[in-house]
């Protein structure tokens, strides 16, 4: 894993696929590697996770070094002031209409293993755009979740007929690498005033799914 950026308040890390962000409900009985616990041991300090990525997903994760920063950052996410951008791969071909940015909306319910669309679910909003064909018959997508529902991007890609490569839970094609072909490669804090960011830059980036 790679520490992307840090100061006295924040730690931003590039989470590998097939790592938990925080301990699961199984606690110590879960033998999967856990990013938060690993970092606390390595840095010999307590960390407060601000948001999470699925076990199968790689990319940027923000931790706070103290409770005050954690409280401030939680408010940013509750107010949708932090824009997360992901890249994903699906199998092609993709119709030309998806080369234009779209806004996908549905209502999602979190089940035991999968999320699903239902009238009694919570509103889910996603911006999506296909970026064109890449190698090996794969098509690249840029995805921005405007809400933070569980498995939101995975469900939406499946629902529109473009299951994410490697995401067998939602019907995705085989993937030769660990995890699934979904990567959180950008965090944008521009909607937050400089004095409120406690040292965070406007934008943090790592390489996308193609370089993963």
Image: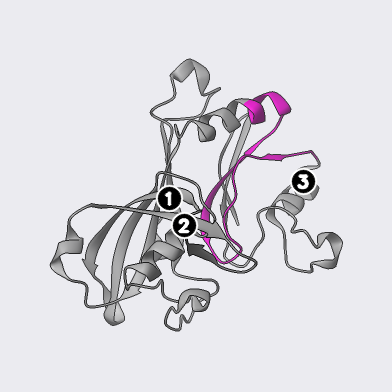
Q: Horizontal and vertical percent for residue 158? A: 39, 70
Disc 3 to disc 1, C-alpha distance: 33 Å
> Is 202 on the left-hand or right-hand side of 110?
left
Q: Horizontal and vertical percent for residue 16? A: 58, 61
Disc 3 to disc 2, C-alpha distance: 29 Å
Decide: few, some or many residues near mark 2? Use Cα within 10 Å; few <14, some 14-19, many ≥20.
Answer: many
Q: Is residue 204 rendered magenta in the image?
A: no
Disc 2 to disc 1, C-alpha distance: 7 Å
> Is 79 on the left-hand or right-hand side of 143?
right
Q: Earlier in the sequence, mark 3 or mark 1?
A: 3
Nearest to viewer (mark 3 / mark 2): 2
> Is 186 on the left-hand or right-hand side of 18?
left
Vertical order, 26 against 94 (above or below): above
Q: Quadrant of residue 43?
A: top right
Along the line of sight, the residue nearer the viewer: 76 or 1: 76
Residue stretch rendered in magenta on the structure: 45-71
Q: Is residue 53 rendered magenta in the image?
A: yes
Image quadrant containing the N terminus: bottom right
The residue singled out by tag 2 in the image is 152
The residue singled out by tag 3 in the image is 40
Vertical order, 25 against 127 (above or below): below
> Is 102 on the left-hand or right-hand side of 37?
left
Decide: few, some or many residues near mark 3? Use Cα within 10 Å; few <14, some 14-19, many ≥20.
Answer: few
What SS does tag 2 mark? helix
The answer to whether the residues at label 2 and label 1 have Cβ atoms under 8 Å apart is yes
């Amino acid at each position: 894993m790679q520490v992307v950026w840090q100061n006295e308040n924040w730690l931003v890390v590039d989470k590998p696929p097939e790592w938990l962000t925080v301990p699961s409900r199984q606690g110590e009985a879960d033998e999967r590697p856990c990013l938060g616990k690993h970092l606390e041991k390595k840095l010999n300090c307590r960390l407060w996770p601000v948001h999470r990525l699925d076990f199968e997903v790689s990319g940027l994760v923000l931790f706070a070094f103290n409770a005050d920063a954690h409280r401030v950052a939680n408010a940013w996410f509750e107010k949708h002031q932090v824009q997360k951008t992901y890249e994903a791969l699906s199998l092609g071909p993709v119709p030309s209409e998806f080369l234009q940015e779209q806004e996908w909306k549905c209502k999602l319910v979190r089940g035991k293993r999968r999320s699903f669309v239902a009238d009694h679910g919570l509103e889910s909003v996603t911006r999506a755009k296909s970026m064109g064909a890449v190698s090996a018959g794969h098509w690249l997508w840029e995805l921005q979740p405007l809400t933070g529902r569980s498995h939101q991007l995975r469900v939406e890609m499946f629902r529109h007929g473009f299951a994410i490569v490697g995401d067998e839970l939602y019907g995705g094609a085989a993937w030769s690498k660990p995890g699934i072909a979904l990567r959180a490669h950008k965090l944008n804090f521009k909607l937050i005033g400089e004095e409120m960011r406690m040292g965070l830059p406007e934008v943090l980036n790592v390489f996308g799914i193609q370089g993963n």
